[in-house]
Amino acid sequence: MEQAVLAALVMVITIVVMLILGFPIGLAIGAGASAGIMVILPFEQAMLTAAKRAFTGANSFSLLAIPFFVLAGNIMNNGGIAKRLIGCANILGSKLPGSLAQTNIVANMLFGAVSGSGVAAASAMGGILGPMEEEEGYSREFSAAVNIASGPTGMMIPPSNIMIVYSTVAGSVSIAALFMAGYVPGILWGVGCMIVAGIMAKKRGYVSHEKYTFASIMKTLWQGIPSLLLIVIVIGGILGGVFTATEGSAIAVVYSLVLSAVYRSLKWKDLPKILLDSVKTTAVVEFLVCVSAIMSWVMSFAKIPQMISDGMLGISNSPIVILLIMNVILLLVGTFMDPTPAVLIFTPIFLPIVQAFGMHAVHFGLMMVMNLCVGTLTPPVGAILFAGCRIGQVKIEQVIKTLLPFFGVVIVALLVVTFVPLLSMIIPNLLGLTTYTGSMFFVGM
């Protein structure tokens, strides 16, 4: 057996066995990749190579944005900003069927836009709106399903940590272009959830009794505008070339701290816990980046990406069929793997294939992120699913049935984003961040 094939087999078998035994995915990838290297090189040289690859993988200026955005999100979650965003969202959703559910969806989109985390958005909004919805007569299953289904919008509407990871792995892909490309798919996801929630709420008789006066609307907007300005400052600064995405993330932390101090809703004694939680989250992401870099080296040596590419092209030469296969694979992968390792592993495999078909790297990045966002809603490792059920005080089996219509509309939105590049590329193109000149529909349609 060839050395490259043996290394690939050892790596894959080790990872699969460790995952079956219940080891964390980061540890499984690290151990499997290291075992694969030891098939190729002597022990000392293998360990040195693994250490070098891990350092190279994490040694990226762009990745510095992740801990700052995570910290900014945690500060917002504890600093009163979430409540003010809910107030603004409630104005937008108050006239729609199931107004509190609509508020939850809009609030998740807004909070995601300032925190970059779907889990943080679902936790913050579910914790505040859940009790309010229960008082209005909403069932816990419905409230939790709405909150969970709309949580991933924060991973697509910028800033987005997973897009930063994709940008690092994909090479020369502009973070600003990815951020701008996320708006339309993220809003499409949110609007789809609003339509489903409205239909379900109307059937269940969930009607709002809250009335807004002009004065109360102005007061709510006045209180919420400083929080919403964070989006304008960070994204506007990045687009205007005033600062990079990494520098913008640091500005987001400072702005969040200042705003929380003005609101007087964040105590000094809360900061150590906020910092510790942020460090834990960042450490997990960085560790996954390190071990995935080792794995990428083994995959490259074993020519795994080339073998997968040849296998897929052996099935069909049609870009439509290839993209459908990729969507299915990514949807399945998302059910048992977190988005970060999935992006790190599958970007080097799939990106060269789609680029050969003329697909833009930014468009593919949005397709991949959207696929993996669906995985955050599904067992066995759906982070947003578990967070939403915990916050909503419901069991997973209780909420899955109510989630099914939301899955349907999200899959439709995913297919639209996959085969209509214009949705992802229009804003980056208008802002001069990309020079996409393809058709409205993907090649072959």
Image: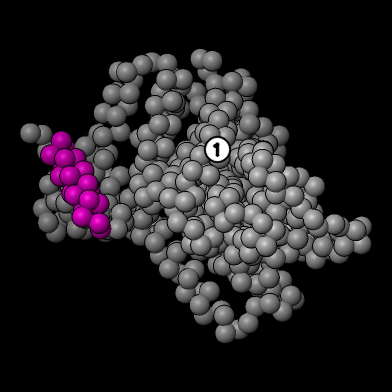
Q: Position of residue 318 (x, y in %)?
A: 42, 16
In this rendered view, identify the residue nearer to me: 97 or 349: 97
Quarter of the image for residue 264 reads: bottom right
On screen, residue 70 versus residue 19, left or right, reads right
**Disc count in the image?**
1
Q: Residue at x 42, y 20 (%)?
A: 321
Looking at the rendered image, the quarter that the C terminus falls into is top right
Coloring scheme of the render?
A: one colour
Horizontal arrangement in the rendering, residue 133 relative to residue 12 (left or right): right
Vertical side of 3 occupied by 295: above or below: below
Q: Locate residue 344, reporting x and y percent.
A: 38, 46
Residue found at the far bottom of this picture? 269
Across and down, in percent, residue 369 comes to 49, 42
Q: Which residue is mark 1?
A: 405
Residue 119 appearing in the image: no
Secondary structure category for the residue under label 1? helix
**Quadrant where the N terminus lies?**
top left
Residue occupying the point 65% across, 72% down: 79
Q: Residue at x 69, y 73 (%)?
A: 260
What secondary structure characterizes most of the magenta part? helix
For this view, does 323 lie left or right of residue 20? right
Asked whether the viewer can see residue 205, the reply is yes
Image point (40%, 37%), residue name: 330
Residue sitting nearer the eye, 52 or 312:
312
- Density class for disc 1 (Cα within 10 Å; few <14, some 14-19, many ≥20) is some
Most extreme residue toward the left, as rendered?
1
Q: Which amino acid, by three-letter code, is at mark 1? A: Pro
Q: The magenta stretch spans which residues?
A: 4-23
- Identify which residue, 14 or 356, lies in the foreground: 14
